[in-house]
Amino acid sequence: MHDMRLLREQVGALRDGLRRRGALEALEPLVSEGERLEQERRTHIAAVEERKAARNVSSQEVAKRKRAGEGADDLIAHGRQLGEEIGRLEVELAATEERLHRILLELPNMNLADVPDGDESQNVIVHEWGTPRSPEGVKPHWEVGATLGMIDLDRGAKVSGSGFVFYRGLGARLVRSLLNFFVDLHAREHGYEEVWPPVLVNRATMTGTGQLPKFEDDAYQTMGDGLFLIPTAEVPVTNLYRDEILDASELPRGFVAYSPCFRREAGSAGKDTRGILRTHEFDKVELVRYCTPEESGVQLELLTRHAETALEKLGIPYRRKLLAAGDTGFSSAKTFDLEAWAPGVGAWLEVSSCSVFTDFQARRANIRYRPAKGEKPRFVHTLNGSGLAFPRTIACILEHHQNADGSVNVPEVLRPYLGMDRLG
RNA sequence: GGAUAGGUGGCCGAGUGGUUGAAGGCACCGGUCUCGAAAACCGGCGUACCGGCAACGGUACCGUGAGUUCGAAUCUCACCCUGUCCGCCA
């Protein structure tokens, strides 16, 4: 969410930001309405507060007279009249503020200066690591997974529905190994605090990270309790310190959390649907960082490197892609996608998305820090990135490390966890 | 799920419907004292919004939301959360 002062003081910059995303045309009506409502809001506040001040003076006078044993009927009548006016004006003010707030919640974040303008065609490959294996002779992961008894899509569909998977035998063990490998890597070597979050969260939490109100259709919801299944651990973990003020000495700090992720994927039918590439429930280890505004650029690089390290340790070739403004997510100011090469599918798979949200999430979630004793609290900057998503990582392992006989070499770093060096 | 007790500032904790943003204590910051520290004493110490170049003024906030009233931390209702006991349960 943006500061509403933006509408008053820097509306030009806001429009530029939306234009860079290619979203100005669609959102211009909201922006101009927001500008108008922002002024209207202040006019209403002045009118209400003026009358409240008068009422307070009047009420004090009533008290004084009553103590002196005098009558105060005239003042009481005056107060009643003021009260009625205040009531009317407050209804108008509330309507204005609610509409203004709704508009602010619908406007996406602005991108940092070094993010290219335009749509996804303007994305930039920043660098590549490793040598992509030739697709020749490599079976896709769903074939290998089925042959080795690791992935059971049919029964996933029977038991839950399309887009749900059973990992079985070595598949289940591989999932468990990845969980431990990723969490150990980031907690022990990269200094993150290990967190095991709840996967059901309330509406305020979902709003804090930007999933609501705009993307309510994408989330699974419980009946009766109004809870949501998280689409990523980013949601509960970023909200850990919602409505709190941190001490500057606590920054920067990072959290690593494994969680299952639940996504309805409304509207993405037909995209990457083969195998386990896009499912309604999948596993992921997520990295979340809080920092001061001054260091968020450096922190994004650090976080992205942590995610890349995971891929490098698994020996999977990947590339880092800087997303153009129009391809950057709603809440993000700058995003790097990490894409790993899957020779069996013959495609680069997005296994991680690392973003800095500037103060956009922190303002929504009201996460602040105090720079120094006696100073005013400021919003922190939040960042997050996958470190990594399991299914696509599994696909890459099964394809990139595949042998001619259909067996798969286990990456060195997973051997202690898996207890073997070869699948099949 | 039932019963019951509660939710007040960073923490603890007072608070009769009328100068209560809120006593008192702790913590913290500054000062006096001291060679230094402790103790003692003095002073300071919330957040947000509106107006103002500023000084400053105004408004709101005592779990949340409605209501009663000229006036609500204080009264009424609903909801949320926490503690305790009972029931159920991995």
Image (cartoon, coloured by chain):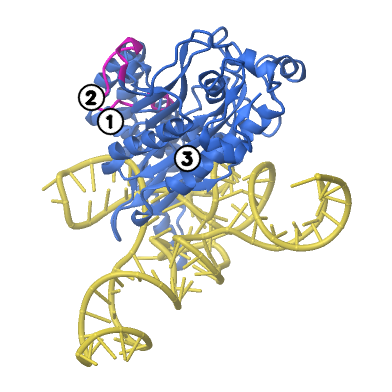
Chain colours: A blue, B yellow
For the magenta stretch, what is the residue range?
A: A102-125
The answer to whether marks 2 and 1 mark residues whose Cβ atoms lie closer than 8 Å is: yes
Q: Give the distance between the C-alpha atoms of the residues marked 2 and 3, in whole angstroms.
A: 27 Å
Mark 2 or mark 1: which comes first in sequence?
1
Q: Is residue A297 above or below residue A347?
A: below
Residue picked out by circle 2: A13
Residue picked out by circle 1: A6
Q: Residue A130: x percent and y percent? A: 38, 24
Residue A32 visible here: no
The disc placed on residue A238 is 3
The disc placed on residue A320 is none
Q: Residue A272: x percent and y percent? A: 54, 11
Q: Secondary structure at mark 2?
A: helix
The quadrant where residue B74 appears: bottom right
Residue A85 painted magenta = no
The quadrant where residue A399 appears: top right
Determine the chain carrying the residue at label 2: A
For badge 1, the amino acid type reads: Leu
The answer to whether marks 2 and 3 mark residues whose Cβ atoms lie closer than 8 Å is: no
Q: Secondary structure at mark 3?
A: helix
Q: Give the distance between the C-alpha atoms of the residues marked 2 and 1, in whole angstroms.
A: 8 Å
Is A375 positioned to the left or the right of A185 in the image? left
Q: Between tags 2 and 3, which lies in front? A: 3
